[in-house]
Image: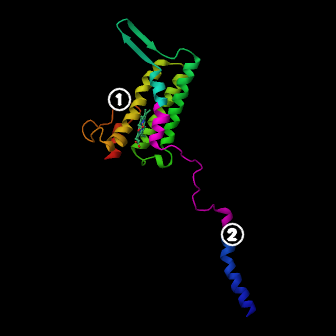
Amino acid sequence: MKTDRLRCSLLHLLPLAFILTTGCETPPAVPAAPPFTPVADVKELMEMVIDPAADVVWESVGAIITAEGTEEIFPKNDGEWATVRNSALVLAESGNLLMLGERAKGEGPWMIMSQALVESARIAFEAAEAKDADAIFMVGGDIYSACETCHVLYWYDEDGAIPSTGSATPPTTTSLILPEKVRASTQ
Ligand code: HEC
């Protein structure tokens, strides 16, 4: 009787022993919570981080044409170049922030537009490091396309500010954004 009970309890222990030994090799199946804690929602990120940074980049280069002539606008010293460079970097990394956690709206165009923002702002960052005003001007259009293509698909449509038919066609002016890919994934 005693040995029976002992055998019984040993048998019960066997699966435990199995779990204990295999538990050393296989990590627990429960996915770990992400270490990051998003603070801003998409609207706040747009208003407080992305829009101000984009304005710095866009307004740093260009030309004012008047009757008196043309005034070229470009950063004039190291400090002004650094301001543009810093804002371009904020913009590029903000594209990554848009893809994190709850902010991401699906795996489709949202990700493509966020990546287009990362890529175009990265080029602006490098142009600012090289103090190349023309390159910043050129890539400014690509940045704008990334913003507006996403707004047409995820913002204006919901608000009805732009009708979902007719003018709500993603702009095709940038080489960074692939309109066919975007359209295919929204059909
Ligand atoms: C991946 C998609 C996406 C990209 C890229 C994007 N936006 Fe937005 N943006 C949104 C969405 C969605 C909203 C609406 C947020 C809401 O009202 O909840 C928005 C709203 C805004 C707003 C209004 C915020 C407010 O106060 O209501 C501004 C300004 C803005 N975006 C600027 C920009 C600029 C500038 C860029 C490019 C440099 C950009 N966005 C790129 C998705 C995007």
Q: Identify the residue shown where x is 70% and y is 83%.
A: 9
Relative to the observer, which residue lies in front, 21 or 144?
144
Instruction: Give the image location of residue 116, x and y in percent.
Output: 44, 35
Taking the image in four quarters, ligand 1 sits in the one at: top left
Task: Specify the amino acid type for callout 1.
Answer: Thr
Element under label 1?
loop
Return the residue found at the far left: 166
In-image side of 19 versus 184 (left or right)? right
The yes-or-no answer for disc 1 within 8 Å of ligand 1 is no
Q: Which of marks 2 and 1 is nearer the N terminus?
A: 2
Disc marking residue 173: 1
Return the residue found at the far bottom: 1
Relative to the observer, which residue lies in front, 91 or 184?
91
Instruction: Check the image and report above or below for 187 versus 149.
Output: below
> Which quarter of the figure has residue 179?
top left
Q: Identify the residue shown where x is 55% and y is 19%.
A: 80
Magenta region: 22-51
Q: Is residue 151 visible?
A: yes
Q: In which quarter of the image is the N terminus?
A: bottom right
Element under label 2?
helix
Label 2 close to label 1 by CB (< 8 Å): no
Magenta region includes residue 164: no
Q: Identify the residue shown where x is 39% and y is 43%.
A: 109
Residue identified by numbered label 2: 20
Instruction: Give the image location of residue 23, x and y in percent.
Output: 66, 66
Instruction: Give the image location of residue 37, x and y in percent.
Output: 56, 48
Instruction: Give the image location of residue 13, x and y in percent.
Output: 69, 78
The yes-or-no answer for disc 2 within 8 Å of ligand 1 is no
